[in-house]
Image: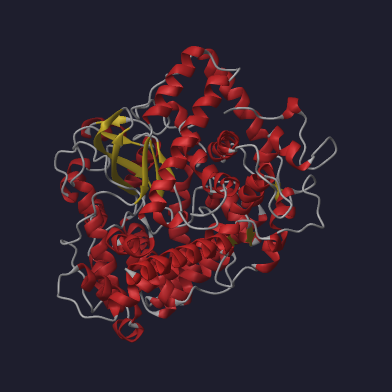
Amino acid sequence: MQKINYLLILLLTMGMMACNQAQKAPRDKGIELADLDTTVSPAADFDHYANGGWKKRNPLPDEKSRYGTFDKLGDVAEQQVKTVFTEITSKQYEDGSIEKKIANFYHSGMDTAAIEAAGISPIEPFLRQVEQLKNIQGLQQLVAQWNKMGISPFFGLYSNADDKNSTMEVAYLHQGGLRMPNRDYYLNTDKHSVEIQQKYREFISHVFQLLGSSANVSEKQAEAIFKLEKQMAKFSMSKLDQRDPYKTYHKMDEGQLAKIAPNYNWAAYFDGIGLGDPGDFIVSQPDFMKGISEMMKTVPVDDWKLYMKWQLVSRMAPYLPKQFVDLSFDFYGKTLSGQLKQRPRWKRVQGTTNSALGEAVGQMYVQKYFPPEAKERMIKLVENLRTSLGDRINKLGWMSDTTKQKALEKLNAITVKVGYPDKWKDYSSMKVTPDSYLDNVLASGRFDFNDMLKKINQPVDKKEWGMTPQTVNAYYNPSANEIVFPAAILQPPFFYMHGDDAINYGAIGVVIGHEMSHGFDDHGRQYDKDGNLTDWWTKDDAARFKKRAKVLADQYSQFTVLDTVKADGELTLGENIADLGGVNVAYNALQMALKGDEKPIDGFTPNQRFFLAYAHVWAENIRDAEKLRRTKTDVHSLGRYRVLGPLRNIEAFDKAFDAKKGDGMYLAPDKRAVIW
């Protein structure tokens, strides 16, 4: 009896100690006062006030072009994955086991001596394929062969739910062929763009010198390749137009595609990739296919041979000897993004291995780092946010009851996925060797292509995930009407198991609200509750939505990114709507959760802590080159504007931090964007 009592007392004492430790744990506090810069008024510049201290204490590492809260948590997840890798690579496993494949893939990338000794021999068979080309027919056959290992010289083929029949998976053909980020890099004529274009030519020239060309010859080769890509850029769809789902939805069969692009043998292409009967498929950019077809007539085969070599080597450069790796980094890392040095090799190789065998790594990751109670609390938070958004929809003054009803139906139909998939991907057919890093990369490409190919013209697998559990991110999928939150994002500073409601609603709550709001942004609102692209809005409600969205777009277009370069409020509109909606929905949910007797913590009320937690999500330091790159290519606003932009439209923020007319954070009520 005494022994039982002693054990009971011991267990109770340990439980109390654990509880006290949890309450005292710094991570549960949420707001770090050192992150603030209290020399700045929160009403003047809330990003500087909330994140100024964090920016000083977290300078940009040389290996990064941007370092923010997401990136910092990404480093945590990267170290967690490293622990998984260390455990795997330090043990012996049977050949064919998933652990052996991960170990072999990783070791092959870390064996730099073998990579240097091999030189370009791993790509020589493919270079010979190019050299043997005699005509356009052979070129097109080679494109199909390379597509099967994940290299897409002209266009990409992938499978996805049919935008207008979300239960079926179909093939999509999408423009490609450009080795700079998008068409603007070729067509813009400002000083900065012209400098990048010249650096790109130099990059191409230096790569061809490594392949054996003289300096004079390689310059001509680079010019020919740049000319080809610039021609493709002229008929490529802009990044902004690609955000319009109707502009990228063109259902065709093989015969219809052949009519608009007759100089490409589509029957041979589909047969060559192993899709002999593609059925109806979606051509995202018909004008691009027309343009490629025309180039089949006008471009000499010798120029295409140069282009194909460039496509191969530029894509495979990170997996070749150091000279190729360094050239690739000099352009894509230094020139485009402003990085000062490369990430350590172990990080790069781990990232490639993690990408190739993502769900296998993810399964091990969640076993080690994702507690079941985190999933349970997250699901409760999601349902609270769903209730909040429903409440806000019901109270919208600008939307008719007819559209409200359909919006609520869509909201209630949203599927929620948290942590990890119920069904894991089977990698048993992927062959991984300990001998060749590049061969393993290509094997991964073949596996992914074959995995994708077998889904075409089959029912959509609703259990499939588009991100791995170890990814620090989240997403909304309009064709599935689902929101997905991988395990890795469910950690501080986004999610606190023992944090107070104000912090959790301000951080992960806004992320949840953001993803929900994507179902009702300028893109997502065009899909119904079943994920089909269809117009479920009344004409008047759609017009009112567009008018309100334009107010927000115009606001963001006034932000100055650098010098005279302005933010692109149209390109980033969907994300900005989701940010604004996310803050409003999460704040509303917090008010529902508060009991009314909460005391300030560190001098901040729950409402103030909510906005501080939100701002901290977007704390970041970023290089000038990366600011410019993201402004051209990214549908997300820069972190600073993700703080300033939404909060200037929210009356509750004004009240929390006493922002009034004349303050930088204040917008007059008639100037605010009010959407969700």
Residue 78 versus residue 110 in the image, above or below:
above
Q: Is residue 135 above or below residue 438?
A: above
Q: The N terminus appears in which quarter of the rendering?
A: bottom left
| Residue at left offset 20%, top offset 43% | 455
In the picture shown, does residue 661 fall above or below 109? Answer: above
Q: Position of residue 436 (x, y in %)?
A: 26, 76
Q: Residue at x 47, y 41 (%)?
A: 381
- Of 135 and 69, which appears nearest the observer? 69
Q: Nearer the viewer, residue 118 or 525?
A: 525
Q: Nearer the viewer, residue 4 or 346?
A: 4
In the shown orientation, is residue 94 left or right of residue 437?
left
| Residue 467 showing in the rendered view | yes
- Quarter occupied by residue 128: bottom left
Residue 626 place in picture, x, y as percent: 60, 59
Front one among 613 and 667 = 613
User: In which quadrant will I find the C terminus?
Assistant: top right
Q: Is residue 291 left or right of residue 629?
A: left
